[in-house]
Image (cartoon, rainbow, N blue to C red):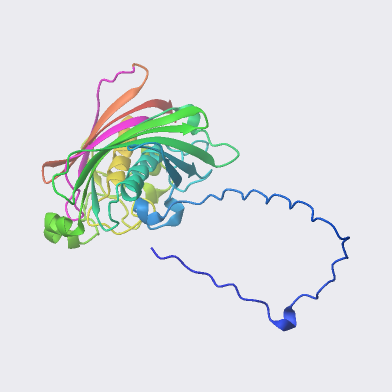
């Protein structure tokens, strides 16, 4: 990243303001100079490169401070209106926005605190979040958040590879809003090229599934057809992953595989497709990523209800497979609302 140096230009003589004479002051000691006014603290988002986003508008972090060797305080802000991360009625933030914010915080601290170079690649193995619904109500101003973050590096396999876990406690003012956990591995670009091989240059367009039209938005808890990522297969509880790879949020930038947040969105939509005509907004989710989801192979999404810890909540286990191999597993819990 380069810093832009600004050069102040003096006004030309033709446009210079007229000089005025200051009134004469009586001889004597000069009065004490007034203390300079305090400079207000200015707020901006962090560099988008630190959170692996192409669009500035999709950066939710605003800064950080170090508490000790492994603990940091990160600040964030959610807009009152977001084209993707909001509930269908527009009154609450989408709990998945907490997952995206936790993901961003882990990447940001790895770059700025662990010194991971910007050209290194991140492998995300786990992403969990639990939210408190009352703290997701949209208010009269943007939602400011404070994240108590802890990074714990594991022993490095090589001098250039870092494996670390990230835990987060998200507060809205004094109130607990969410907690989260993630595990990442970072690798140099050269190692990533060897790991991915020919896949690194794979066509970003998904393989045609030829299974019909995407599900209606209302069936998966969405409003806009372009946000739907699932297509029916004719088999109960089973769908094909068919996201729009031009989606400005889910595919914010080009990638050689389907991003983990797209798979998490597929799990949320599968949960709603399974429970229709009941809408479920997952208040918590625990996701394990087993391998990359490739663009050029059909991804099958399956969902089934499973016993949970809360009798008044609905728990669903969602899995994704490619070529018979597991891609990810997500366990979601939420409270159903009748449509």
The residue closer to the viewer here, 167 or 299, is 167
Name the residue rendered at 16%, 60% in the picture.
Answer: 190
288 is within the stretch colored magenta: yes
Expressed as whole percent of the image width and height from the top left, the position of residue 51 reads 36, 50
Left or right, 326 with respect to 239, comes to: left
* 28 in relation to 222, above or below: below
Looking at the figure, which quarter contains the C terminus? top left
Question: Can you say whether 18 is above or below 69 in the image?
Answer: below
Q: Residue at x 53, y 43 (%)?
A: 80
Q: Position of residue 134 (x, y in %)?
A: 49, 27
Left or right: residue 142 versus residue 153 is right
Residue farthest to the top?
Answer: 311
Closest to the observer, 244 or 174: 174
Number of callouts: 0
The answer to whether residue 202 is seen in the rendering is no
Residue 322 rendering spot, x and y as whole percentages? 15, 46
- Residue 201 lies in what quarter of the image? bottom left
Q: Which residues are magenta?
A: 282-310
């Amino acid at each position: 990243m380069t810093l832009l140096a600004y050069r102040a230009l003096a006004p030309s003589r033709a446009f210079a303001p007229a000089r005025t004479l200051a009134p004469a002051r009586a001889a004597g000691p000069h009065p004490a100079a007034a203390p300079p006014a305090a400079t207000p603290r200015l707020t901006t988002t962090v560099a988008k490169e630190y959170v692996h986003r192409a669009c500035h508008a999709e950066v939710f972090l605003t800064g950080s401070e170090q508490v000790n060797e492994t603990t940091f305080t990160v600040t964030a802000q959610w807009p009152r209106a977001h084209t993707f991360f909001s509930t269908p009625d527009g009154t609450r933030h989408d709990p998945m926005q907490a997952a995206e914010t936790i993901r961003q915080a882990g990447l940001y601290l790895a770059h700025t605190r662990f010194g991971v170079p910007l050209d290194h690649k991140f492998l995300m193995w786990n992403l969990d979040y639990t939210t408190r619904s009352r703290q997701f109500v949209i208010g009269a101003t943007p939602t400011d958040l404070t994240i108590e973050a802890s990074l714990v590096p594991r022993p490095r396999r090589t001098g250039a590879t870092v494996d670390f876990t990230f835990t987060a406690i998200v507060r809205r003012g004094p109130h607990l809003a969410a907690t989260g956990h993630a595990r990442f591995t970072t690798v140099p670009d050269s190692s990533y090229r060897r790991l991915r091989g020919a896949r690194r240059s794979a066509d970003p367009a998904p393989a045609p599934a030829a299974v019909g039209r995407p599900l209606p938005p209302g069936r998966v808890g969405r409003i806009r057809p372009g946000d739907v990522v699932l297509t029916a297969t004719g088999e109960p509880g089973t769908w094909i992953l068919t996201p729009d790879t031009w989606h400005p949020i889910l595919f914010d930038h080009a990638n050689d595989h389907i991003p983990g947040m797209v798979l998490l969105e597929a799990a949320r939509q599968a949960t709603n497709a399974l429970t229709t005509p009941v809408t479920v907004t997952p208040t918590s989710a625990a996701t394990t990523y087993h391998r990359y989801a490739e663009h050029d192979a059909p991804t099958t999404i399956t969902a089934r209800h499973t016993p949970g810890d809360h009798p008044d909540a609905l728990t669903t286990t969602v899995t994704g497979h490619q070529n018979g191999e597991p891609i990810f597993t997500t366990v979601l819990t939420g409270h159903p609302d009748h449509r």
